[in-house]
Image: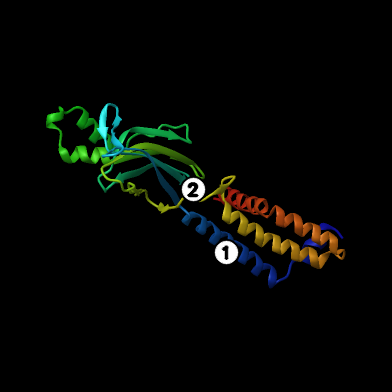
Amino acid sequence: MDWLSFAKSLWNPVSTPLTLAAGALGAQLWQRYLRRLSAFRWSVWHNRLAISGTDPNLGNVEVLWNGSAVTNLYFCNIEFENESSQDFSDVEVKFWYADGSHFLGQGNLTGTAQFLPWAHDYGELLHRLLSTPPDQQSATEMQHAITHREYRIPVFNRGSKFNLTFVVHSNNALIPYLSVACDHKGVKLLQRTQRPEFFGVVQTHAAWVGMAAGLVVTTAMGLAVATSWIAAVVGFFIGAFGTFLGLAIIRLKRWIVRSIG
């Protein structure tokens, strides 16, 4: 059979055009779905660094930061990730405390080689405060400066992630509560609690996906293979390494989404 005859055998006046149309429609819907996935996910956790206090039996404990007395010190760790299928530029993100806690110092940036400059308005505020004598500074502006950190991300590619670490001072024993905002067009900001990860994938997600895939593979092997011990061995290895299977499937899905997007 030559190629022309083979091509004619694949053509059906009804089903072939419908199949092509359905495929084109599915591709368009998939592209629109990917464009809607402009999600930035963030998570934060605080670790107590030091606490000052007075006790009649234990004595007095003083905490100093750069020679100044403080009450409660925390490490604030922020993780910020572009989980969408798109690349962004000039993204402004704001972090602030509304409970009276405030940042100490500029913090530490990891996970990226690029420098994160201050957001335009926030940078002008800092410049104005630094160029004004302390006794003439606005109390409102100073309060905003120490309770906020606002950055501009020059380039934020799909899958990119960075971490910010700050020293935070709180006037009470409660864990500080951080708020985050990003008003970039087409971006949805989602908070994610810290969960155990397995090679960059949430461990529970990998386990569930691996279990579902293993069930499908084991069932197919049981129906297709006449020798029962082969199916049993395959089922054993899938059960033992199901999390790795789920990890591979999730990472493959991410790669496909980012490649198509």
**Viewer-side residue, 27 vs 118:** 118
| Amino acid type for the residue under numbered disc 2 | Gln
| Amino acid type for the residue under numbered disc 1 | Leu
Residue denoted by label 2 = 86
Q: Secondary structure at mark 1?
A: helix
Residue at 44% across, 49% down:
40
Residue denoted by label 1 = 25
**Viewer-side residue, 179 vs 150:** 179
Mark 2 or mark 1: whose residue is earlier in sequence: 1
Residue 51 left/right relative to 191: left
Q: Is residue 4 visible?
A: no
23 vs 55: above or below: below
Measured as percent of width and height from the top left, residue 243 is found at 65, 53
Residue closest to the far front:
57
Measured as percent of width and height from the top left, residue 219 is found at 75, 66
Measured as percent of width and height from the top left, residue 81 is found at 46, 45
Q: Quadrant of the N terminus?
A: bottom right
Q: Secondary structure at mark 2?
A: loop
Residue at 54% across, 62% down:
29
Residue at 60% across, 48% down:
255
The mark tally for this picture is: 2
Residue closest to the far left:
136
189 vs 130: above or below: below
**Viewer-side residue, 140 vs 50:** 50
Q: Is residue 195 visible?
A: yes
Q: Are marks 2 and 1 in contact (CB under 8 Å)?
A: no
Crowding at mark 2 (Cα within 10 Å: few <14, some 14-19, many 20+): many
